Image: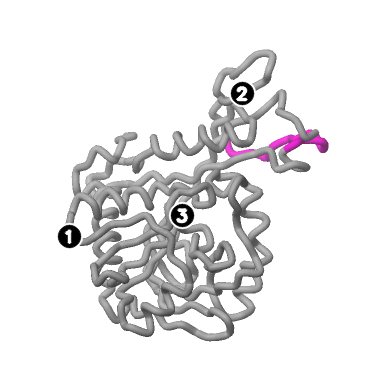
C-alpha cells in the first residue's frame, strides 16, 4: 500500500510504499465521527500483450480533487476543516461485481421513500457517507428479490442512479428518435468515468441521438407500454456495463426487454471498452504502467 501523510503545518510528507497493514486512528478522528473522508476506485488491466494499463486515470483524479474540495480535505484546503489527513492506496485483484456474473441482467427496486442525494448535497462527490447511508435501502431491495436500488428523486420520480452505477436508457424517445439517454450532472449524479466514456463513444459513432436529460418513471412506463424501450443498463468501473431486465415499482414488476434486443448496444459498449482496457485496441484513454 501507498501512504502519504498531510498536516496543516507541514503539508504533504514523503510517500511511503509498504506491505498492506491496518490503519491506526485516534478515536476522535473526524473521518469516523463526521465522515470527513473520500475514496476513489480505479482498475489496472493486464492486457493481451502482458502490459498493464490504467483507464482514463486523469478523470478519477479530477473527480478526487472535486470530492476533496467538498469534504474540506487537501488539496483544497470536530465539525471543522481537518488539520491532518492521510492519503493511501491499496491494491487487490477483483472479480465480477455481481455474484450472478459479469454480464447477467439484474433486477432493480424503485421506491421514492429512500433518497440517495439531493440538490445542494454531496451526491456528485465520491464520499463514503453517500454509500454507508444507502446500505439500508439496498438490504430492503435484496429482501424483495432485487439486486440493486434504482434511486428516484423528486415528486415526479426522476430516475437518477442504479445502486453504485450510472444509468443509461436506449429507446425510441417521445419524438420518434433512437436515443441513448442518461440523467444530467445536476449535482446529484456522480460523474462516472465509464459514464463519460460511453457518452464519448456514442457521440463519436454518430449513429443515434445522445442526451443527458431527465427521465421520470412515468416516461419509462409510458415507453414500455408503447414498446419504445430497447435496452437499459448500468455503467461503472466495477461492472463496466451491466444489463437491466426488471424493475419493481409501486408493487409491479416492469419487464425491460434488454436481453431480447441482444443486448446489441450494451454488448457493443462492453466489447469496445474492454478492447481498450485490455490493450486489444490502441487508445489515448489508457496509460501504460509497465
Q: Position of residue 163 (x, y in %)?
A: 53, 62
Q: How far apart, in angstroms, are the residues tagged by discs 2 and 1?
A: 44 Å
- Residue 21: say if magenta: yes
The residue segment tinted magenta is 19-30
Mark 1 or mark 3, which has the lower sequence index? 3
Question: Which dot marks residue 77?
Answer: 2
Q: Residue at x 35, y 40 (%)?
A: 56
Dominant secondary-structure state across the stretch colored magenta: loop
Residue visible at 63% across and 36% down in the picture = 71
| Drawn side of residue 143 relative to residue 2, left or right | right
Classify mark 1: helix, strand or loop: loop
Q: CA distance from mark 1 to mark 3?
A: 34 Å
Left or right: residue 287 compared with residue 142: left
Q: Which quarter of the figure has residue 13? A: top right
- State the residue at coordinates (45%, 34%): 62
Which residue has dot 1 on it?
207
SS assignment at label 3? loop
According to the picture, the residue beneath numbered tag 3 turns out to be 94
Q: Position of residue 214 (x, y in %)?
A: 43, 60
Amino acid at each position: 500500500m501507498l501512504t502519504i501523510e498531510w498536516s496543516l503545518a507541514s503539508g504533504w510528507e514523503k510517500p511511503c510504499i509498504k506491505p498492506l497493514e491496518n490503519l491506526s486512528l485516534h478515536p476522535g478522528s473526524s473521518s469516523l465521527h463526521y465522515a470527513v473522508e473520500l475514496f476513489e476506485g480505479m482498475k489496472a488491466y493486464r492486457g493481451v500483450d502482458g502490459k498493464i494499463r490504467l483507464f482514463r486515470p486523469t478523470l478519477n483524479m479530477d473527480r478526487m480533487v472535486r470530492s476533496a474540495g467538498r469534504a474540506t480535505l487537501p488539496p483544497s484546503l470536530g465539525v471543522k476543516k481537518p488539520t491532518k489527513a492521510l492519503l493511501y492506496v491499496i491494491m487487490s485483484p477483483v472479480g465480477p461485481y455481481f455474484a450472478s456474473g459479469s454480464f447477467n441482467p439484474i433486477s432493480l427496486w424503485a421506491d421514492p421513500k429512500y433518497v440517495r442525494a439531493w440538490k445542494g448535497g454531496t451526491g456528485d462527490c465520491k464520499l463514503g457517507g453517500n454509500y454507508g447511508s444507502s446500505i439500508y435501502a439496498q438490504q430492503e431491495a435484496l429482501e424483495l428479490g432485487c439486486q440493486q436500488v434504482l434511486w428516484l428523486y423528486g415528486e415526479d420520480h426522476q430516475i437518477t442512479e442504479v445502486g453504485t452505477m450510472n444509468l443509461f436508457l436506449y429507446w425510441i424517445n417521445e419524438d420518434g428518435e433512437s436515443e441513448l439517454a442518461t440523467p444530467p450532472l445536476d449535482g446529484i449524479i456522480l460523474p462516472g468515468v465509464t459514464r463519460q466514456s460511453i457518452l464519448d463513444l456514442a457521440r463519436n459513432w454518430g449513429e443515434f441521438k445522445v442526451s443527458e436529460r431527465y427521465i421520470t418513471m412515468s416516461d419509462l412506463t409510458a415507453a414500455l407500454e408503447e414498446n419504445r424501450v430497447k435496452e437499459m443498463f448500468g455503467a461503472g468501473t466495477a461492472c463496466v456495463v451491466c444489463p437491466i431486465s426488471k424493475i419493481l415499482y409501486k408493487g409491479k414488476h416492469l419487464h425491460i426487454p434488454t436481453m431480447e434486443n441482444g443486448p446489441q448496444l450494451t454488448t457493443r459498449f462492453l466489447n469496445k471498452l474492454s478492447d481498450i482496457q485490455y490493450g486489444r485496441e490502441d487508445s489515448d484513454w489508457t496509460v501504460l504502467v509497465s
